[in-house]
Amino acid sequence: MRASPDDGRSWHDRPTPSPVSSIATHPARPGRLLAGLARGGVTVSDDGGTTWAARSEGLASGEVTALAVAAGNPDMIYAAIRGDGLWKSEDAGATWALAMDRPWLDAAERDPLTLASVDLETGMGGIWIYAGTEKGLTRVPDCFCRWQDVQPGNAMDALVTGDTPPAEAPLPADEPVLSLASAPAAPSTLYAALPSGVWASQDGGVIWTHKAKGQGRAVAVHPRDENHIAALLNGTLNLSRDGGATWAALAVA
């Protein structure tokens, strides 16, 4: 792992205890890094990655394919375990419990490849957990009642009344969603990395626009500026300060 303290101008190595398959942070804990490990388990650093401690008590074995920290609670962590389900910890990883099964998409259970916790006012209200899978995007309220499609908040009202359904422009249906990022400064703003590039939504994932072409692998957003984003495109780290309208490549050396 490499980290930059100055917006990509310089980089420093940060050791990790095992190959890392997922990582998460929270703006309320600026020095805390959470890493999901390819061999199984979660490890936590509270000093920016200098030292790490295992936090996997009660967590199922298997690769941690995705991690997220709850939007309103930096000690609430969600972890997706390959072939198992979605797990949660309410004490910063000290203990874990199963939250729910994997999402069911296209006639089969799918492993989340990425997770994002979003404080979003919708028809259901409250916090949502978004999951990107090999078969697209889904989400669940933090009551963990059921996984569901991303729809406008008033979609059900239109269905009942017979009115014209609200506009939708979902992500490409034939691509995996490899990375998601939610902007804490503007919760309805989401970014996604797909094989076709970087996509953005201003309404919680109902309508998406294509912001950058190329092989997208990862995307992240600044905690205080929803237009300041970084993305891994075609193996190169790129930075945008205008919500993806323009990009500049960064050298990681």
Image (spheres, grey):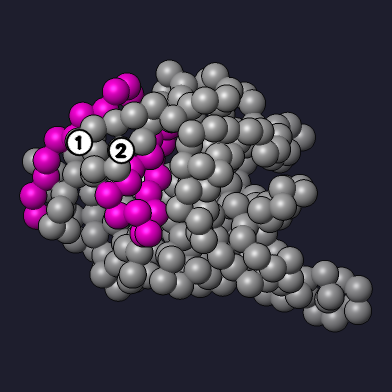
Residue 163 left/right relative to 205? right
Q: Position of residue 22 (x, y in %)?
A: 41, 36
Q: Is 34 part of what is drawn in magenta?
A: yes
Look at mark 2 in the image and give the residue it sits on: 45
Q: Position of residue 49 (x, y in %)?
A: 24, 38
Q: Amino acid at mark 1?
A: Thr
Q: Amino acid at mark 2?
A: Ser
At numbered mark 1, what does the secondary structure look like: helix, strand or loop? loop
Q: Earlier in the sequence, mark 2 or mark 1?
A: 2
- At x 39%, y 26%, the residue is 54
In terms of depth relative to the viewer, which is nearer, 48 or 194?
Answer: 48
Q: Quadrant of residue 84?
A: top right
In the rendering, which numbered label is found on residue 50? 1
- At x 91%, y 79%, the residue is 161
In the rendering, which numbered label is found on residue 168? none
Q: Eyeballing the image, is 101 above or below 40?
A: below
- At x 87%, y 71%, the residue is 159
Q: Position of residue 218 (x, y in %)?
A: 37, 46
Quarter of the image that includes the C terminus: top left
Question: Marks 2 and 1: CB-CB under 8 Å?
Answer: yes
Report the span colored magenta.
8-36
Quarter of the image that includes the N terminus: top left
Residue 111 left/right relative to 116? right
- Between the C-alphas of marks 2 and 1, the distance is 7 Å
